[in-house]
Image: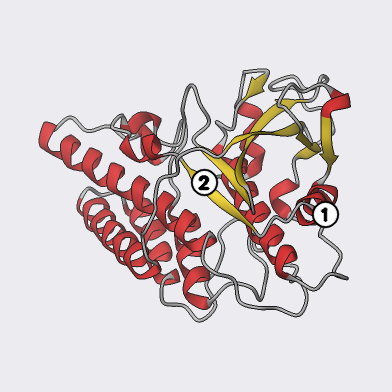
Amino acid sequence: MKDGTSYARFLDKEIEANDVNGVIPQLIALAGYGSEFLIASSNTEPPELSETNSTFQYAHTVKFLEDGSGIPTQDVSKGTKEWFNRLRAHGCSRILLEILATELERTDTTTLGWYTGEIPWAVRTIQPSKATSWLPHWTTIPEFRPGKPTGEKRIWDIAYSPKPGRTRAIEGVSLEQARSELKEALEEAIDFSSKSTLSSWSQRFEKALQNLSKDRPEFAYHHDLLPQTSYSLQARQLIASAEQAWVFGGMGSWNDIGFQNPMTSKKYNQISQRLYQSILTAFAVGVNQPLLVSASPGRG
């Protein structure tokens, strides 16, 4: 997940979550902090993540829509605090990270992390009678022009639109299985990149691998990605490792590498697919782990 300043390279006026630099971390924060609030005592104040959390640092506005139409009068809530309160009032017990099964079946390694059509990532709210998927839509503010600084870093208007719960991928995968798969994928990527004189990538994967065994795993870009006290050490290790291992994007990313040797290229594609699948699985399994009971929400 590259630094957020790279957002300005996008030429499209609107995107539907195809900037993984910001979208997936924001979904993780919504699921983690929101779930922590939902299990906290009734007098606990919900967090306004748009003001306090780094995954929202480029958000100009954040709203949650009633029907996805985008009509202002149809807003369910503006900001996360109001949304979390509304979810609690309607009996929501958990917010999960959702990834579609089709995203784990991608074969074109040059486009991993990017997509056309239906958004493959979302958050899912669980209520007594229904499950709802909330799909993100990011639109640049009117005054934004690619390549022309506006003096405003909060350039995204973000709307979350609900739809009936979709069929999720990554069902029945244990924390131990997700950790083992990510570890093996990283070890394979390290071996390949070190033998292919891609030392900078090898170092990146080494750091990700180290996070799986650190007493204090280090998040590469968002130190406040998760609440401080609600996730087990093993879950934090897994998510921190996956965040560090994310190398997919546009120009200059892991996706941008090419090889003339057909056998090397085939191996690279196999490693890239496995790594992508293991990272997404790690995110989902880690974020969706049962929370530890906490007296009050942590701040990251």
Left or right side of 21 for 168: left
Secondary structure of the residue carrying tag 2 is strand
Choose the circle earlier in sequence order: 2 or 1: 1
**Residue at 42 percent of width and 65 percent of height:** 207
Between circles 2 and 1, the one closer to the viewer is 1
Instruction: Give the amino acid at mark 2.
Output: Glu
**Which disc is residue 85 wearing?**
1
Residue 103 location in percent, x, y?
40, 37
Q: Single out the residue that lies furthest toward the left.
A: 263
Q: Nearer the viewer, residue 264 or 45?
A: 45
Provide the residue designation for mark 2: 98
Q: Single out the residue that lies furthest toward the front.
A: 129
The image quarter containing residue 160 is top right
Calculate the distance from the C-alpha at mark 2 to the C-alpha at mark 1: 21 Å
Q: Nearer the viewer, residue 70 or 223?
A: 70
Left or right side of 219 for 30: right
Residue 111 location in percent, x, y?
39, 29
The image quarter containing residue 8 is top right
**Residue at 66 percent of width and 39 percent of height:** 5
Q: Is residue 67 above or below residue 226?
A: above
